[in-house]
Image (cartoon, grey):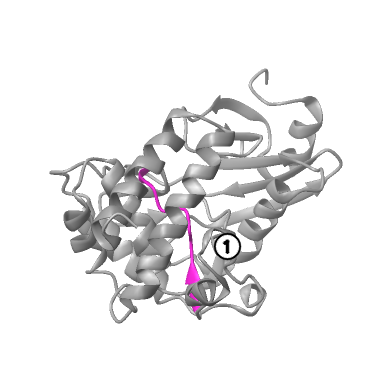
Amino acid sequence: MDDLPDPHFQELIHPYTGDVTRVRCPASGFSSDYAAIIHAEHGQFFVKGMFNEPGARLESLFKERDIAPFVQSVAPQLLWSVDGEGWVILGFEVVDGRMSVFDPGTTDLPEVVDALNSVAEIPVPAVAQGWIEERWDSFADNESEAELFRGTTLLHTDINPSNIMIGTDRTWVIDWSWPTRGAGFIDPATLVVQLISAGHTPASAESWAAQCSGWKGAEPRAIDAFARATWRMYRHWARHFPEEWRRAMEDAARSWVGYRCNGA
C-alpha cells in the first residue's frame, strides 16, 4: 500500500492485520511519526508508529503502550504492539466517535468533565508509580511551588479537544502519550487553559474545572502556582517554536494568570 510508510512497516504489522486494503490518515491531532486507520483482512485498526530511535518521543509511545491495559475503562483498547527494527507500532481498536468541541455554547463539556472524573478514579498502576509529574517544575517560582504539583493521581496531562472523543453512548480519552502521577488538579487545570483558548472567560473555564473531582479540595496557592508555571511554559515554547497554537495557548494562560493572580 502506497499510504503505508515503507515495506518493512507493512511486514511488521501483517501478522496482526493481514493484507491491508485501505488506509485513512487523520487530518490532525497526533504527534507520532505515523498514524492512520487501517482497513485490513483481519479488521480495522488505528495504528501509531514511531521510528525506533532513542528519545523522548519514542519513550512516550512506550508509556502509552504500558499504561494501555490500565485505562481501558476510558480509552480505546490496545490490541497489539510490535517492536521491530526501524519501527515501534501500536494497534488500537477503532472507535466510533468525533472530536469534542470546547467552544462556548458547546454541549460536550458535561461529557468532558465526566471523562476527567473517570480518569481520576483509575488507581495508579505499579508501572506508573515512578512517572512523577515534573514537566512544569522548571517554570515554577521555586522548588516549594513545584512540590505542589506532586500527588497520587493518574494524570493524562494532554487534555484538548482532539484527545476527548464523543460517541453516541460513551466518551473516550485517547492519546495517552504523557501519563504521569501527580496532583489531581492538573488535568482539570489543563482543561481550563484549553477552554480559555477556545473563547471561554477564565471564570467560566474554572466553573467547569470545579466540577472535576481532582479540582475539589486543591489548595488555591497550588492552582495559582500551576497557572503561572503554565504561562511561563507556553511563553518559553512560543518563543522557541512560534507556531500559532502555542501563541494562542500562551495568551490563554496569561489571561488565566491575570484572573487568578491579579496580573502576577
Q: Residue at x 65, y 64 (%)?
A: 66
Q: Amino acid at mark 1?
A: Ala
Which image quadrant is residue 251 in?
Answer: top left
**Between 145 and 85, the one nearer to me in the picture:** 145
Q: Residue at x 55, y 70 (%)?
A: 142
Q: Residues within 10 Å of mark 1 (few under 14, many from 20)?
A: many
**Residue 46 visible in the displayed image:** yes
Q: Residue 77 vs residue 62: left or right?
A: left
Q: Is residue 77 above or below residue 3?
A: below
**Residue at disc 1, secondary structure:** helix
Q: Residue 168 vs residue 90: left or right?
A: left
Q: Position of residue 150 (x, y in %)?
A: 52, 76
Residue that sits furthest to the right in the current view: 85
Quadrant for the C terminus, please.
bottom left
**Residue 174 visible in the displayed image:** no
- Numbered label tally: 1
Q: Position of residue 217 (x, y in %)?
A: 30, 82
Q: Is residue 82 above or below residue 37?
A: below
Residue that sits furthest to the top in the current view: 2
Q: Is residue 91 above or below residue 179?
A: above
Q: Magenta segment: does it hold 191?
A: no
Look at the image and give the residue range highlighted in magenta.
153-161
Residue under numbered circle 1: 68
Q: Residue at x 46, y 37 (%)?
A: 246
Which image quadrant is residue 181 in?
Answer: bottom right
Which image quadrant is residue 161 in?
Answer: top left
**Between 55 and 199, the one nearer to me in the picture:** 199
